[in-house]
Amino acid sequence: MVCKNCKMELPVYASYCPSCGMKVHKPPLHHDIDTTKGPQHEAHARHVDWLFEPVYREIERRLDEPNVDKPELFDTAHRIEAEVLKGNAANPQKISRWLRFYQEVAPDLLALTVAALLGTDSDVSPAVRSAVLEHAALPA
């Protein structure tokens, strides 16, 4: 996303352009709108967006590291979120693999993601919940 005023590339969670100070207007969605099939599914997708909000915010706040790029962290969070949105059709092996990636390169993001997916209001499928529980017990 770029600033409409100065055309500078904006950080994902910027509220204001760091170059010119213009307020950034963007939709609070992480999921692809094309994946929703009706109002009930869209409500669930927006809820999952809300659950993942702390994960995306933490990624944006992280300092640049030589071993891992922010886009890679964002992409992994987006993939986990998209898989969770599949409900009972979600592939727990994929989610487990992506959580292992977080365990290796960003244990803080693993903790946030696990907390989001195991929360009492998360409403994830039992298969996803069991995959996430395996990572909840692992040392960071």
Image: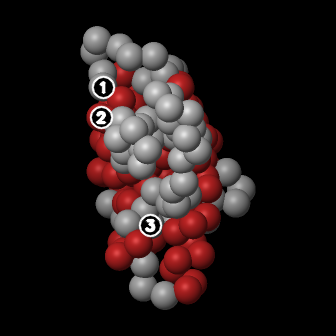
Seen at 30% across and 25% down, the residue is 69
- Residue 31: x, y in percent? 43, 62
State which tag comes first along the sequence, 2 or 3: 2
Residue 22 position by quadrant: top right
**Could one spot residue 78 in this view of the protein?**
yes
Total number of numbered labels?
3
Dot 1, crowdedness within 10 Å: few (<14), some or many (≥20)?
few
- Kind of residue sitting beneath label 1: Asp
The mark closer to the camera, 1 or 3, is 1
The reply to whether discs 2 and 1 touch (Cβ–Cβ < 8 Å) is yes
The mark closer to the camera, 2 or 3, is 2
**Could one spot residue 107 in this view of the protein?**
no
Which disc is residue 15 wearing? none
Q: What residue did someone put label 3 on?
A: 85
Q: Which residue is at the far top?
A: 66
Looking at this view, is 56 or 41 the one in front? 56
Residue 39 position by quadrant: bottom right
- Kind of residue sitting beneath label 2: Glu
Find numbered disc 2 in the image and state the secondary structure of the residue it sits on: helix
Q: What residue did someone put label 2 on?
A: 72
Q: What residue did someone put label 1 on?
A: 69
User: Position of 127 compared to 112: left or right?
Assistant: left
Q: Which residue is at the far right?
A: 120
